[in-house]
Amino acid sequence: MTINLTRRGFASLSLATFALATASLLAPRAKAAGKADVKIDNFAFAPETLTIASGTTVTWTNRDDIPHSIVESSGLFHSQAFDTNGSYSYTFEKAGTYDYICGLHPHMMGKIIVKS
């Protein structure tokens, strides 16, 4: 098979290739699952509400000088108590809203919103 391109034909082909490459770079992509952090400090979760993509691992890190634990309201996950600089991680696989508290200090409340 022989391809015979004139300069105009070559320029058109190059422009079309450029347009396709640019379109693929600009097209919206699904956000890759990643990592997110919640800090525990001064008897509060920061951020108190966190919105993430499904597949994201959230890590809670204790910055207080006393132990805390993470307890999801429906029992989906429940950490052991962890001390200063200790952490607990959970990977959220399904879309939904997940309310949680500190099991040792129930007035501490937080929320994870998982988008698909």
Image (cartoon, grey):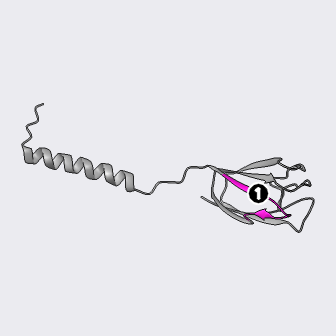
Q: Is residue 99 visible?
A: no
Residue at 51% x, 54% y: name it: 30
In the figure, 113 relative to 18: above or below? below
User: Disc 1 marks which amino acid?
Assistant: Lys
Picture quarter with the C terminus: bottom right
Q: Secondary structure at mark 1?
A: strand
Query: Which residue is at the front of the view, 16 or 59?
Result: 59
Is residue 22 in the magenta section?
no
- Residue pictured at 31% horizontal, 48% vertical: 21
Q: Position of residue 64 (x, y in %)?
A: 86, 56
What residue sits right under mark 1 in the picture? 39
Q: Is residue 27 left or right of residue 37?
A: left
Which residue is at the far bottom?
A: 107
| Quadrant for the N terminus in the image | top left
Quarter assignment of residue 2: top left
Q: Position of residue 15 (x, y in %)?
A: 20, 50
**Mark 1 residue crowding within 10 angstroms, few (<14) / some (14–19) / many (20+):** some
* 50, 29: nearer the viewer: 50
Residue 84 coordinates in the image, percent (x, y): 86, 50
Can you give x and y, in whole percent of width and height, for residue 49 in the image?
71, 66
The residue shown at (40%, 56%) is 27
The residue under the point 82% across, 60% down is: 41
Which region is colored magenta?
Answer: 36-47
- Residue 65 left/right relative to 58: right
